Amino acid sequence: MAGRGQRAASTPTRGSKARLRLWLRLLGTSGRIERHLRARMRREFGTTLPRFDVMAALDREGDGLTMTELSRRLMVSNGNVTGIVDRLAEDGLIIRVPSPDDRRATFVRLTERGRAEFAAVAAAHERWVNELLGELSTENTLRLAAELDHLKSLLEDRDR
Amino acid sequence: MAGRGQRAASTPTRGSKARLRLWLRLLGTSGRIERHLRARMRREFGTTLPRFDVMAALDREGDGLTMTELSRRLMVSNGNVTGIVDRLAEDGLIIRVPSPDDRRATFVRLTERGRAEFAAVAAAHERWVNELLGELSTENTLRLAAELDHLKSLLEDRDR
């Protein structure tokens, strides 16, 4: 991952180099935290981040989600989500239920056990993030988050 | 992905919630930029980010790298790198050469064509990043990068 785009670009201005450097920092920092969380989740819960993400999405929707809606929210392909959902169902953490509005559509939702397991992993996840970023003062944390919010809104404007 | 760890944690202080939120922003922003770059790289060069990363690492080491060293720099497993290197070799973008010090060891390095192709993709990559982040002023960019540097150094201290 390190060092994408070290070569001269067609617009080697100070701003352009600074923005490339910002992107490499963003990628590097986020990758480092993600690797740490992934390893810890595997070690302590035998689970994976994509599986955790599926459970998080279902936890926020008590009535369940269709597979299409679930994939959309996770921004990954239906195929990838299907495998994860199959495993979660085998493990008794989610069930498939008919849609109340349309009997041909199927919803997936967490079981009680799935909900309890998600709560345990989510609490540990928050604790790990807090340990990882614990040296960052609350003031620094809030400022950095606000700047990333600003960047996010600029990116969303672009996508519109 | 969206919404990791929405549930109550064992330490629901203001700082803890703020740090979790920062991590979700970091992950979201970096994921959004990465998806954009991945799609554009595929569309305009028919290539992938991992392949670009392998070429970037080799571009910085003109004499080449062993597979082990290459994997270490990319922080991925040897197996994943092997497939990418095989394809790059088939495409004439890299070659395998014996180590000058140890004839049993093999180095991989970019060919002239590989070097030229990498330069073209890297220049486009920098241009895309600059377009994506172009609305961010140079001042904001430098400040955000400095804050991420600070965070990175805290994370590195932890890992020591």
Image (cartoon, coloured by chain):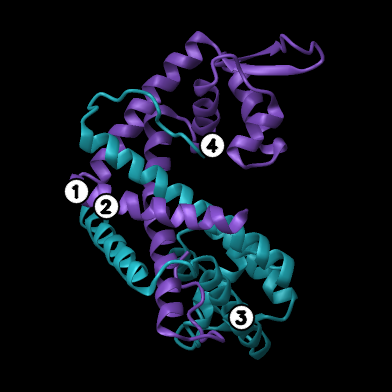
Chain colours: A cyan, B purple
Q: Chain of mark 3?
A: A
Between the C-alphas of marks 2 and 4, the distance is: 29 Å
Helix, strand or loop under label 2: helix
Q: Quadrant of residue B63?
A: top right
Q: Secondary structure beneath disc 3?
A: helix
Q: Residue B139 — which label?
A: 1
Q: Which disc, if any, is residue B143?
A: 2
Q: Residue at x 72, y 37 (%)?
A: B79
Label 4 vs label 3: CA separation?
Answer: 32 Å
Disc 1 vs disc 2: Cβ atoms closer than 8 Å? yes
Label 3 CA crowd tier, 10 Å (few <14, some 14–19, many 20+): many
In the image, residue B37 lies at what x, y percent?
38, 41
Left or right: A14 with respect to A43?
left
Q: Amino acid at mark 2?
A: Arg
The residue singled out by tag 4 in the image is B50
**What's the distance in space between the residues labelled 1 and 3, CA to CA?**
41 Å
**Mark in the foreground, 2 or 4:** 2
- C-alpha span from label 1 to label 2: 6 Å
Residue under numbered circle 3: A118
Q: Is residue B54 left or right of residue A146?
A: right
Q: Label 1's element?
A: helix
Please tell me whether residue B144 is drawn above or below residue A69 in the rendered image: above
Residues at marks 1 and 3 touching, judged by CB atoms closer than 8 Å: no
Which of the two residues, A153 or A21, is positioned nearer the viewer here?
Answer: A21
Circle 1 crowding by C-alpha within 10 Å: few under 14, some 14–19, many from 20: few
Point 71% across, 31% down: residue: B68
Q: Amino acid at mark 4?
A: Pro
Q: Earlier in the sequence, mark 2 or mark 4?
A: 4
**Mark-to-mark CA distance, 2 and 3:** 37 Å
| x and y percentages locating residue B96 in the rendered image | 67, 14
Please state which amino acid type lies under the numbered disc 3. Phe
Q: Earlier in the sequence, mark 1 or mark 4?
A: 4
